């Protein structure tokens, strides 16, 4: 495909890295110039151009822009009928994006994560999923959502990633004070959590680790008694209320 990318921040750059060797012709904008040039240096299929050049050279266009500045950036650009737009903007609905890119069509809102650069990443999206699966589905798992409201709920829920990472990091720090190789300790914990959850429902894993008086049960009950569950729900409710 001829793919264009408007905005090359951290996430958009990861997206380009993940598809740059799939035979596409990719044109990225000069926004975040250092990242754009780095991508062009790494991949023969990636070229850098002005925003209008990106539009002219592409049939599928990714919008890696901030929602509050997108309208001003897109307004001077001339899109054409038949172009398909995939937005990475969490704060804009499909209808919002569609109004900014006419006569092109906004077909999907997609929320990638940095892991998309290597593959094996979950991708939550709303809209027409066929194109998203065609571009990303070989290496990643696409979760197609039914509505913008579903997307907003998923956006709140995915924020659990940061506290989980912080929790593993803090546990790694605790372990590192007690063992010879702190780096190995944290690596063990990361692999333990990732591999344990990869193919098992959370409830099933908790039950499997629920040996009476066992280490896992004792620590979980201690954290629940000290407000882990209620703090999590309150934080998610606050995020939902702010959307």
Image: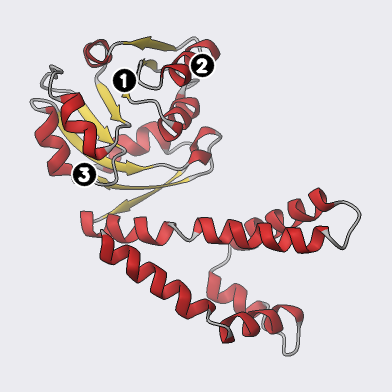
Q: Relative to residue 177, is residue 183 depicted above or below?
A: above
Residue ID for mark 2: 38
Q: Residues within 10 Å of mark 3 (few under 14, many from 20)?
A: some
Tag 3 secondary structure: loop
Residue ID for mark 1: 4
> Which labelled disc corresponds to residue 136?
none
* Residue 242 visible in image: yes
Tag 1 secondary structure: strand
Tag 1 or tag 2, which sits nearer the N-term? 1
Residue ID for mark 3: 92
Front: mark 2 or 1: 2
CA gap, disc 2 and disc 1: 16 Å
- Quarter placement of the C terminus: bottom left
Residue at image coords 51%, 14%: 43
Residue at image coords 91%, 54%: 180
Tag 3 or tag 2, which sits nearer the N-term? 2
Residue at image coords 38%, 68%: 236
* Residue 198 visible in image: no
Picture coordinates of residue 178 (x, y %)? 87, 63
Out of 4 and 76, give the one closest to the viewer.
Answer: 76
Residue at image coords 46%, 26%: 19
Picture coordinates of residue 62 (x, y %)? 30, 29
Picture coordinates of residue 172 (x, y %)? 74, 58
């Amino acid at each position: 495909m001829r793919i264009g990318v408007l905005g090359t921040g951290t996430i958009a750059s990861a997206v380009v890295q993940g598809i740059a060797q799939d035979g596409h012709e990719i044109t990225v904008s000069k926004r975040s110039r250092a990242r754009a040039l780095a991508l062009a240096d790494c991949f023969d299929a990636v070229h850098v151009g002005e925003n209008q050049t990106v539009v002219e050279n592409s049939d599928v266009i990714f919008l890696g822009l901030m929602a509050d500045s997108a309208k001003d950036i897109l307004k001077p650009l001339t899109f054409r009928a038949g172009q398909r737009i995939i937005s990475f903007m969490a704060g804009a609905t499909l209808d919002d994006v569609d109004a900014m890119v006419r006569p092109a069509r906004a077909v999907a809102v997609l929320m990638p994560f940095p892991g998309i650069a290597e593959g094996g990443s979950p991708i939550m999206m709303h809209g027409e999923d066929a194109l998203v699966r065609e571009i990303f589905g070989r290496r990643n798992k696409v979760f197609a959502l039914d509505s913008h409201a579903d997307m907003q709920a998923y956006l709140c829920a995915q924020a659990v990633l940061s506290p989980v990472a912080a929790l593993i990091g803090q546990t790694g720090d605790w372990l590192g004070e007690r063992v010879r190789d702190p780096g190995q300790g944290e690596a063990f914990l990361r692999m333990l959590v990732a591999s344990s959850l990869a193919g098992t429902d959370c409830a099933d894993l908790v039950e499997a680790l629920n040996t009476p008086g066992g280490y896992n049960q004792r620590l979980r009950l201690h954290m629940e008694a000290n407000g882990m569950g209620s703090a999590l729900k309150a934080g998610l409710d606050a995020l939902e209320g702010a959307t």
